Amino acid sequence: MRFGIVGVANTTVYYLIYRLLLLVMPYLPAHVIAFACGVVFSFYANCLFTYRVRPTWRRFIEFPATTAINFLITTFGSMLLVNAWGVSPKWATLVATVVAIPFTYLATTFVLARPRPDTPAAQHK
């Protein structure tokens, strides 16, 4: 449930930035910049709210791997929707984002919630 709430908030942050950037640039650069902003927001929101773990530099460096799948699905999905099916760039990335949700959840859980060798939870195993 918390992952879903953060996902909605993250999508809102991304989409607002994306729509603002669409006013001054083409949809793909707008998508890339908005996505990068969303990654930073998502990292902190998932650490602090979803998984309740301390945000560390190590996690921050690993976190973009969780979004690589999301980025590929949303980018290529958007291109497919816009170029092949004529969907407006205003909506294509939003549709592609919904498709990416289950894949992003699995990757994020792996990176943020797995026991670390230096944590008390991992030392008891």
Image: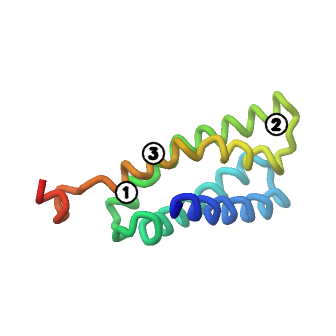
Looking at the rendered structure, the kind of residue marked 1 is: Leu
Residue 53: image quadrant is bottom left
Q: Position of residue 54 (x, y in %)?
A: 34, 71
In the rendered image, which residue does mark 1 sit on? Answer: 112
Taking depth in this image into account, of 51 and 82 the one nearest to the observer is 51
Q: Residue at x 59, y 60 (%)?
A: 38
Q: How much space separates mark 2 and mark 1, taking CA atoms?
A: 33 Å
- Chain-order first, disc 3 or disc 2: 2
Q: Which mark is residue 106?
A: 3
Q: Residues within 10 Å of mark 1 (few under 14, many from 20)?
A: many
Q: Which mark is residue 82?
A: 2
Q: Residue at x 58, y 57 (%)?
A: 36
Looking at the rendered structure, the kind of residue marked 3 is: Leu
Residue found farthest to the front: 1
Q: Is residue 26 left or right of residue 125?
A: right
Q: Is residue 3 left or right of residue 16?
A: left
- Location of residue 4 with respect to 85 vertically, above or below: below
In this orientation, does residue 38 appear? yes
Q: Residue at x 58, y 47 (%)?
A: 101
Q: How much space separates mark 3 and mark 2, taking CA atoms?
A: 27 Å
The coloring applied to the image is rainbow
Q: Is residue 125 left or right of residue 94?
A: left
Q: How much space separates mark 3 and mark 1, taking CA atoms?
A: 10 Å
- SS label for mark 3: helix
Q: Position of residue 115 (x, y in %)?
A: 25, 55
